[in-house]
Image: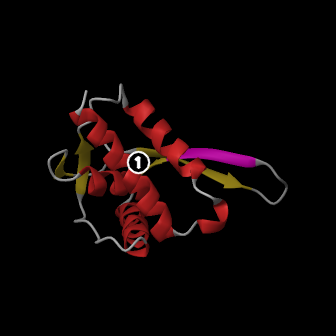
Amino acid sequence: MELSENGWGALAAWFAGPRNVIREPMGERTDVVRVTCEMADGTSRDRTEIITEADVRDIEDGIESYLVGSWLPARPRGYRWFMRLPAAVEDEREFWRRLNEADLRMPHQERDLIREAANLGAAIRGLFELSTHV
């Protein structure tokens, strides 16, 4: 599955490990993104536009900040990341559901980026360990 362009997608790649992850150059971005502007009167307006290089830099900066804040190394920029699903997981929807469940079990008072990454990392590694026994 293609991993999401956010901190959790980067964590999934890191904790799944190089045997389960590949990357390919991003190439030119032509994605259409939806922009929502919330007005002072409470209304909102949506529009679509093509993603800009500045948008891509902001996304990559956010991912890098999340990883560094989790005490993990920054990843190379300019790639799409793909992860082999653990055999014990039916589809990507189930994978993200299981990560969300692990996240919800984490006590709120113990939450910070380092602990969140360790908790999600344990869940991801656990899914791959289950796969070796299926």
- Compared to residue 76, the image places residue 92 above or below, namely above
- Picture quadrant where residue 14 is located: bottom left
**Tell me, what colour scheme is on the image?**
secondary structure
Q: Please give the name of the residue rendered at 43% of the width and 62% of the height, measured from the top-left corner.
A: 117
Residue that sits furthest to the front in the current view: 133
User: Which amino acid type corresponds to the residue marked 1 in the rendered image?
Assistant: Ala
Horizontal side, residue 47 vs residue 28: left or right: right
- SS majority, magenta: strand
Q: Using the rendered image of the protein, determine whether residue 6 is visible from the camera's viewpoint.
A: no
Horizontal side, residue 125 vs residue 109: left or right: left
Can you identify the residue that label 1 sits on? Answer: 123
Q: Position of residue 133 (x, y in %)?
A: 24, 31
Magenta stretch encompasses residue 46: yes
- Picture quadrant where residue 2 is located: top left
Q: Position of residue 88 (x, y in %)?
A: 32, 29
Q: Is 21 in front, or is 103? A: 103
Residue that sits furthest to the right in the current view: 41
- Picture quadrant where residue 85 is located: top left
Q: Please give the name of the residue rendered at 49% of the width and 62% of the height, measured from the top-left corner.
A: 116
Q: Please give the name of the residue rendered at 55% of the width and 69% of the height, measured from the top-left corner.
A: 112
Q: Using the rendered image of the protein, determine whether residue 112 is visible from the camera's viewpoint.
A: yes
Q: Please give the name of the residue rendered at 21% of the width and 35% of the height, measured from the top-left corner.
A: 132
Magenta stretch encompasses residue 104: no
Count of numbered tags: 1
Q: Which residues are magenta?
A: 44-48
